[in-house]
Amino acid sequence: MGGEYGRTSAFLLITACLLIFLVPQAVSAGTDSTANTEILCTFPGRIVEAGETVTFDLKIKCNLGTNPRMLEFDTFKGEDDWKYHFYSGEKEIDRILMTEGEVIPITFEIDTAGDTAVGVYPVRVRIDDARLWIYITIDKSHAGE
C-alpha cells in the first residue's frame, strides 16, 4: 500500500510541476505582444561597386500610438566615410509622426565610398522598437585608382 501511495504522490507532484510551467506560457502566448513599430523591406540586400549610391525602399508601419519616432541606423564595419539619408519623396527627414495602423514609405539612401574594400556591410535601421538588418555587398573596389 505504501508503494502505490508513493507512485500516486510522485505522479501528482510531476503533474503539478508541469502545470506550473506550461499553463503560464500558454496564457502569455495568447497576449498581444506586437511591436509598436515595424520596418519592412522587400529587398534588404544589394550588390554594388564601391562609390555607388544604394537605395532601400522601406515601409514603416505603426501598430501603436502617435508619438514622433526618430529614424536611426547603426554601422558595424567602419563605413565612417559613407553618407546616409532618409527620404520621404524628395524631402530629407530624420523622424516621422504616424497614426495607429498607418504605413509610410521611406527611402534609405547610402552613398558608399569609392575606396571601400570588397565585402558585405551590414547596416541596422532602427525606429522606436523596430529593427531591420540590411546588407550592402561591395563587389568591386576602386581603392588605389
Image (cartoon, rainbow, N blue to C red):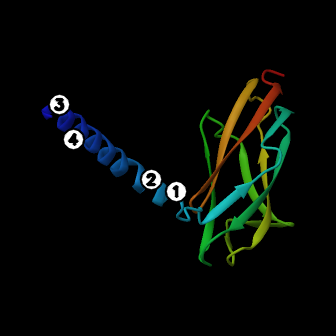
63 on left or right of 44: left
Q: Which residue is mark 3?
A: 3
Residue at 79 percent of width and 21 percent of height: 144
**Residue type pointed to by label 2:** Gln
Is the residue under label 1 in contact with that under label 2 (CB below 8 Å)?
yes
Labels 3 and 4: the sequence-earlier one: 3
Secondary element type, mark 3: helix
Labels 1 and 3: the sequence-earlier one: 3
112 on left or right of 95: right
**Nearest to the observer: residue 104 or residue 101:** 101
Up/down of 49 relative to 21, above or below: above
Secondary element type, mark 1: helix
5 on left or right of 38: left
Residue 29 — which label? 1
Which mark's residue is nearer the viewer, 2 or 4?
4
Residue at 59 percent of width and 62 percent of height: 34
Secondary element type, mark 4: helix
Rendered-image quadrant of the C terminus? top right
Labels 4 and 1: the sequence-earlier one: 4
Residue 59 — which label? none
